[in-house]
Amino acid sequence: MKIARTPKELKEILKVNTGSVGFVPTMGALHHGHLSLIEESVRKNDITVVSIFVNPTQFLEGEDLDKYPSKFEADEKICSLAGVDVLFYPQVKDMYEDDEIKISAPNIRGCILEGYVRPGHFDGVLTVVMKLLNMVSPTKAYFGKKDAQQLALIMQMVKNFCMDVEIVALETIRESDGLAMSSRNVYLNKNERVEALKISKSLKVATKLVMQKKLTTELIKKEMFQTLEPLDIEYVAIVSRAFIPLNEVEIGNTIILVAAKLGSTRLIDNLWL
Ligand code: AMP
């Protein structure tokens, strides 16, 4: 596995490649969720590039940028064992100039839910993903459904800017008790870790109601709130794949999203129906 520490080094390494390129952008502190994306990319492409970059522009003032978990050595080992060909590990100074053209998230998908609670977050996400996709020029890029709104916005960006890449979305990987894997789970203390299970439980409650043909979103949300309480709930939303709020669950076109805080740790999870 080669390690590229600058966009220039990355370009040098990639210029000899003539086959298909799979790309998995991450912020590091890799877990099985990331690994599922990496493994799928290794299976389906001639070479796989993984990036590890904690992108400052997607963090708001007061968020966890400075304490975001960093485990480069462990991540390097995981990537190498998984068959990654190139690990891209750039520094902020090589990714950004002082005064740049801004990409801003669109109104509908960009300013609700995560975009509402974290204004500007998606502008930063789209900017860095655009940069990374341009640097790597992958055939396919892999993203998790865990970040459903991010995924929808990246798909929209690729479409709007006519970018020549296929976006592949993969399922959320969970701990055995149901908690969605996240690099931020390490922040949880013992009690918060137990309480965090309410998030995946609330999604199971929603699944059960839908299986009983109880499709009214007001009712589903009410029952989800009952499961989630007394957590500090930021939102429970039931939207279409286009992120339009729904009155009734439409099978094949619905995402149920939850965001809640456990102490100072924000967790998100969702269910695709
Ligand atoms: P991050 O390092 O958090 O920026 O995530 C990098 C990629 O991994 C994103 O596409 C995420 O959606 C994806 N990802 C994060 N957690 C999971 C998970 N539990 N299951 C599947 N994919 C995930």
Image: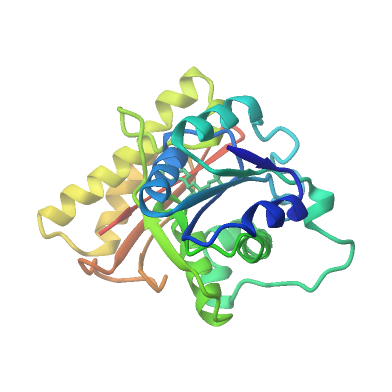
Say which quadrant the C terminus sits in: bottom left
Q: Position of residue 41 (x, y in %)?
A: 42, 50
Q: Which residue is depicted at the point 17% across and 52% down?
A: 209
**Vertically, is 151 above or below 160?**
above
Q: Is residue 70 visible?
A: yes
Nearer to me, 42 or 225: 42
Q: Is residue 231 visible?
A: no
Q: Position of residue 205 (x, y in %)?
A: 23, 45
The colour style of the image is: rainbow
Q: Which residue is depicted at the point 57% across and 69% down?
A: 110
Q: Position of residue 72 (x, y in %)?
A: 65, 30
Q: Which residue is depicted at the point 52% across and 68% down?
A: 153
Q: Is residue 41 left or right of residue 125?
A: left
Q: Is residue 97 left or right of residue 16?
A: right
Q: Position of residue 194 (x, y in %)?
A: 40, 24
Q: Which residue is depicted at the point 83% across and 69% down?
A: 100
Q: Is residue 25 left or right of residue 31?
A: right
Say which quadrant the N terminus sits in: top right
Q: Quadrant of residue 29?
A: top right
